[in-house]
């Protein structure tokens, strides 16, 4: 029998053929492997805990309207005159106050404006760098 020997009607387990398990009973090799396993588990839990503390987005959810980076975007909609100046009302009804270019000649017309969109104090603005009359938007 490989791995077991018959002794007085009982089966006695022989650990010779079991490789790493042959050190059961307090061998140095087994203690080393258990220590490595415990340390690896601790490291994994620590890293996972730190990632969870940051949040799913890596900590980028702590912005206010005054400190996020403006992004270039294209806004299509109807040009209107408002109490805050000329604005583009997008197809979903969102208003963007226009700066950078004079669109007052296009009041009542649809345009597609490209520029940096930003939010300050609850007001969305677009610093228009280019625009075009929009026929199908």
Image (spheres, rainbow, N blue to C red):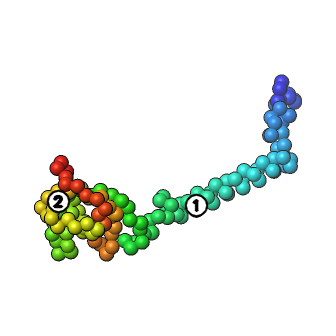
Quadrant where the N terminus sits is top right
Q: Is residue 108 left or right of residue 95?
A: left
Q: Which residue is mark 1?
A: 49
- Residue 31 to residue 86: above or below: above
Q: Which residue is mark 2?
A: 78
Q: Earlier in the sequence, mark 2 or mark 1?
A: 1
Regarding residue 124, the answer to whether it shows in the image is no
SS for dot 1: helix
The alpha-carbon separation of the residues under discs 2 and 1 comes to 49 Å
Regarding residue 58, the answer to whether it shows in the image is yes
- Residue 87 to residue 34: above or below: below
Q: Nearer the viewer, mark 2 or mark 1?
A: 2
Q: Residues within 10 Å of mark 1 (few under 14, many from 20)?
A: few
Query: What is the total number of numbered labels drawn onto the structure image?
Result: 2
Q: Residues within 10 Å of mark 2 (few under 14, many from 20)?
A: many
Q: Residue furthest top?
A: 1
The answer to whether mark 2 and mark 1 are in CB contact below 8 A is no
> Residue at position x 19%, y 52% from top?
134
Closer-to-camera residue (26/61): 61
Closer-to-camera residue (37/59): 59
Closer-to-camera residue (120/3): 120
Closer-to-camera residue (107/75): 107
> Residue at position x 19%, y 69% from top?
86
Q: Is residue 93 left or right of residue 21?
A: left
Q: Is residue 25 left or right of residue 51?
A: right
């Amino acid at each position: 029998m490989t791995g077991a020997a018959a002794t007085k009607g009982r089966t006695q387990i022989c650990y010779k053929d079991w490789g790493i398990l042959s050190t059961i009973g307090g061998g140095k090799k087994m203690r080393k492997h258990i220590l490595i396993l415990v340390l690896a588990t601790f490291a994994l839990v620590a890293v996972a805990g730190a990632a969870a503390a940051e949040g799913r987005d890596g900590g980028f959810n702590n912005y206010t309207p005054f400190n996020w980076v403006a992004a270039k975007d294209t806004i299509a909609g109807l040009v209107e005159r408002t109490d805050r100046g000329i604005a583009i009302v997008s197809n979903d009804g969102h208003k963007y106050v226009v700066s950078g270019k004079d669109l007052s000649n296009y009041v009542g017309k649809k345009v597609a404006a490209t520029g940096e969109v930003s939010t300050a104090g609850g007001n969305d603005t677009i610093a228009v760098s280019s625009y075009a009359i929009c026929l199908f938007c």
